[in-house]
Image: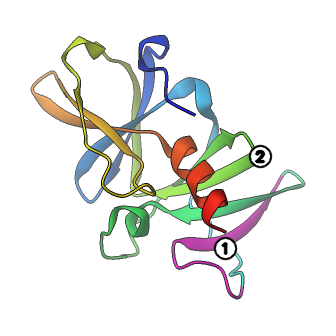
């Protein structure tokens, strides 16, 4: 599924390793303070484990491992994203804000790794923001499993 960038005006901005990332708000269900996930034996390395959130089992994915960044104990939030096959959580260092982005100056990023959530970059108020499509990434993960 391709991200419809022009349909998404509000974006949730969050930090991973001092870089600002954004994901469309309309695909986000909720944000939680970080909780350690229950490990799942045999799961891929980017899967932190699972959590029970209001009676639903949610797979938690490490944003740092997806992006090839060294793991630290900096995770402060889990962003719950609605994918076509259910809820998936992504651990991030810190959720910053919801903002409106002008997508006219966006620069698409070449997809070398199909598991990479990075879709494009955008300069917003003198800051580089990396646009992410974690839903596409999760759908690709399910195709590999």
Q: Where is residue 88 in the image (x, y as percent from the top left)?
A: 66, 52
Separation of residues labelled 2 and 1 (CA atoms): 15 Å
23 versus 4 height, above or below: below
Choose between 137 and 11: the one closer to the eye: 137
Question: Between residues 71 and 41, which one lies in front from this camera angle?
Answer: 41
Query: Percent position (x, y) of residue 50?
Result: 72, 68
Q: Residue 110, position in %: x, y?
A: 26, 43
| Left or right side of 83 for 25 | left
**Label 1 belongs to which residue?**
49
Question: Which quadrant holds the C terminus?
Answer: bottom right
Outermost residue to the right: 55
Specify the segment rendered in magenta. 41-53
Callout 1: helix, strand or loop? Answer: strand
Q: Which residue is drawn at 71% across and 77% down?
A: 38
| Dot 2 crowding, Cα within 10 Å, few <14, some 14–19, many 20+ | few
Determine the residue positioned at 39% across, 57% down.
Answer: 93
119 left or right, relative to 108: right
Q: Nearer the viewer, mark 2 or mark 1?
A: 2
Q: Which mark is residue 86?
A: 2
Residue at the spot x=24%, y=11% of the render? 104
Please name the residue shown 57% across and 53% down the image. 140
Label 2 residue SS: strand
Residue 92 at x, y = what percent? 44, 56
- Residue 95 placement: quadrant: top left
What colouring does the structure picture have? rainbow
Does the magenta run of residues contain 50?
yes
In this picture, is 71 found above or below 135? below
Corner quadrant of residue 29? top right
Q: Is 25 colored magenta in this rendering?
A: no
């Amino acid at each position: 599924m391709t991200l419809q960038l022009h349909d998404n005006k509000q974006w949730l901005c969050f930090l991973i390793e001092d870089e600002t990332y954004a994901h469309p708000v309309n695909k986000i269900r909720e944000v939680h303070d970080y909780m350690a996930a229950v490990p799942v034996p045999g799961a891929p390395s980017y899967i932190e484990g699972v959590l029970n959130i209001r009676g639903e089992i949610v797979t938690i994915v490490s944003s740092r491992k997806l992006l090839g960044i060294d793991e630290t104990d900096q995770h402060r939030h889990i962003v719950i994203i609605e994918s076509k096959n259910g809820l998936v959580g992504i651990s991030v260092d810190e959720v910053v804000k919801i903002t409106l982005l002008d997508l006219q100056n966006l620069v698409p990023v070449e997809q070398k790794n199909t598991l990479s959530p990075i879709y494009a970059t955008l300069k917003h108020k003198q800051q580089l923001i990396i646009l992410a499509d974690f839903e596409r990434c999760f759908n690709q993960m399910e195709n590999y499993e």
